[in-house]
Amino acid sequence: MPADMPYRQHLTSRDDLVTTYEETRAGFVALALERNRRATPFIEEARALKVDRTVP
């Protein structure tokens, strides 16, 4: 195997590049959960600022 084609160790046909529906869905769910986790502190801070602003 030529050194310039190391991908051939893992890819044998074009079907190796196809992502299943379940894998795609799991990836989107994982991404959504990560975004939610990262955004939560900012949302809580914004809510606190909103409450502070409305209290006279």
Image (spheres, grey):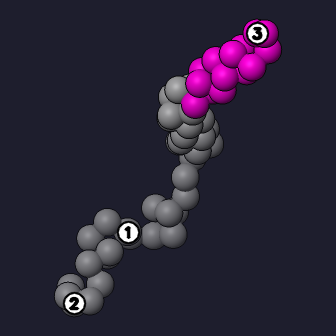
Q: Is residue 11 magenta?
A: no
Q: Answer yes or no: is residue 47 visible.
A: no
**Circle 3: is it few (<14), some (14-19), or many (20+) Cα within 10 Å?**
few
4 vs 41: above or below: below
Task: Provide residue 9's location: percent of width, then percent of height.
Answer: 26, 70
In the image, the segment drawn in magenta is 42-56
Query: Residue 28 is drawn in which quadrant?
Result: top right
Q: Earlier in the sequence, mark 2 or mark 3?
A: 2
The C terminus - image quarter = top right
- Amino acid carrying label 3: it is Val
Distance from the alpha carbon under mark 2 to that under mark 1: 14 Å
16 vs 44: above or below: below
Main secondary structure of the magenta stretch:
helix
Task: Provide residue 45's location: percent of width, then percent of height.
Answer: 59, 24
Q: Answer yes or no: is residue 14 visible.
A: yes
Q: Earlier in the sequence, mark 2 or mark 1?
A: 2
Distance from the alpha carbon under mark 2 to that under mark 3: 71 Å
Residue at 50% x, 34% y is: 38
16 vs 54: above or below: below
Task: Provide residue 46's location: percent of width, then percent of height.
Answer: 66, 26
Residue at 60% x, 21% y is: 44
| Residue topped by disc 3 | 55
| Residue topped by disc 2 | 2
CB of mark 1 within 8 Å of CB of mark 3?
A: no
| Residue topped by disc 1 | 11
CB of mark 2 within 8 Å of CB of mark 3?
A: no
